Image (cartoon, grey):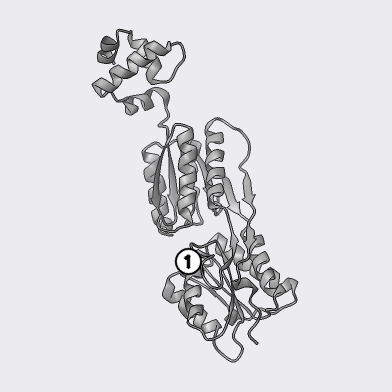
């Protein structure tokens, strides 16, 4: 800073004001200081700034899987909000492993991030209590925290699934299968509950053989689809519990010699270009991320109050696959 001040012909305090965006500096002086900074390659020492202000201007984002298309717009939205607040985003994937989630979260806390946005893999987040008490603001997104009270931003998984299955019923289907993610995952359980509610609303039975929850690995989903599509009374429609399940089911249905209706939860890329197009229950991943990040910075700015649960709506997008009539 002394070198910058000498080159620009100003005092140290003026350099400090320019670097920290403080008022009280004329445009011409600010230009001279900035030119000196650029010429000398000056970089602010953020470690010293942290010691002085107690904030790192960084937040952490823990996702399930960075490779999942659903999390791309969510992560981007969180990053945009962080940038608007002058903060850096650091993210990582838990791979749906509770131990890895805890390891990532505590590693981010050890690096003194100001706050966390977490898509939880586990169902017990008491390990975060000391960090939250120490001032690390935390917002959960897509799924609620387990065994602690914390802000959470969710999509209406129950209502969306209920609407999707009701749509299939309205088009004449009575034997409807459900293929979802692992039952311990909040969104999978809520979508199964929505499926059962829609069937009950219509007075329709749900046979155990029509429901399959588990890994979203293609081989598991393919086996589940083959099972519910075979036998003396195969299902005439499938409700797919998330985007990865939907993609595999589309591939299975492409190999059949009969039409089977399909509604998927989450939109998928190129869904409108398939024949028929894939009818989906769409959630706004970007809005989830934006709302969670805004809530986080609201807390970082000192907003008081008890933790809140914010639930965003979903919408049905009809493209053809969900409107197919029963084949028999």
Given residues 274 and 295, the one toward you in this image is: 274
Relative vertical location of residue 227 with respect to residue 114 in this rendering, above or below: below
- 171 sits to left or right of 219: right
Q: Quadrant of residue 89?
A: top left
Q: Is residue 112 left or right of residue 297?
A: left
Give how far across and how far down residue 148 sits, in percent: 55, 48
Identify the image quadrant of residue 220.
bottom left
Front-most of residues 41 and 205: 41
Left or right placement of residue 138 versus residue 27 in this view: right
**Depicted 166 relative to depicted 127: above or below:** below
Quarter of the C terminus within the rendering = bottom right
Measuring from the top left, give residue 42's x and y in whole percent: 28, 23
In percent of width and height, residue 105 lies at 41, 47
Residue 76 coordinates in the image, percent (x, y): 46, 46
The answer to whether 171 is drawn above or below residue 190 in the figure is below
Image check: 204 left or right of 290? right
Label 1 secondary element = helix
Q: Is residue 149 visible?
A: no
Residue occupying image coordinates x 39% and y 11%: 28
**The N terminus: image quadrant:** top left
State the residue position of label 1. 244
Q: In the image, what residue occupies the spot 26% across and 12% down?
A: 7
Residue at the image position 42 percent from the left and 76 percent from the top:
219
């Amino acid at each position: 800073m002394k070198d910058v001040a000498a080159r620009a012909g100003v005092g140290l305090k003026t350099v400090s004001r320019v670097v920290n965006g403080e008022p009280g500096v004329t445009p011409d002086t600010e230009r001279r200081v900035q030119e000196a900074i650029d010429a000398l390659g000056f970089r602010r020492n953020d470690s010293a700034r942290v010691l002085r202000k107690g904030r790192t201007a960084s937040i952490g984002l823990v996702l399930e899987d960075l490779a999942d298309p659903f999390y791309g717009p969510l992560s981007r939205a969180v990053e945009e909000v962080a940038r608007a607040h002058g903060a850096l985003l650091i993210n990582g994937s838990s791979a749906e492993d509770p131990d890895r989630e805890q390891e990532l979260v505590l590693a981010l806390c050890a690096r003194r991030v100001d706050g966390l946005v977490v898509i939880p893999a586990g169902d017990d987040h008491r390990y975060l209590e000391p960090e939250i008490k120490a001032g690390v603001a935390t917002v959960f997104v897509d799924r609620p925290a387990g065994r602690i009270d914390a802000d959470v931003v969710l999509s209406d998984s129950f209502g969306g699934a209920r609407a999707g299955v009701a749509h299939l019923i309205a088009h004449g289907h009575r034997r409807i299968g459900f293929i979802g993610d692992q039952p311990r995952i909040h969104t999978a359980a809520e979508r199964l509950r929505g499926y059962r509610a829609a069937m009950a609303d219509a007075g329709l039975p749900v046979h155990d053989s029509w429901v399959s929850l588990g890994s979203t690995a293609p081989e598991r989903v393919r086996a589940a689809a083959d099972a519910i599509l075979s036998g003396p009374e195969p299902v005439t429609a499938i409700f797919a519990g998330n985007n990865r399940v939907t993609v595999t089911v589309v591939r299975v249905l492409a190999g059949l010699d009969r039409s089977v209706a399909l509604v998927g939860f989450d939109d998928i890329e190129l869904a409108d270009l398939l024949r028929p197009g894939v009818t989906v229950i769409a959630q706004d991943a970007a809005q989830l991320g934006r709302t969670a990040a805004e809530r986080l910075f609201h807390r970082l700015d000192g907003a008081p109050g008890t933790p809140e649960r914010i639930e965003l709506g979903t919408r049905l997008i009809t493209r053809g696959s969900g409107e197919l009539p029963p084949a028999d």
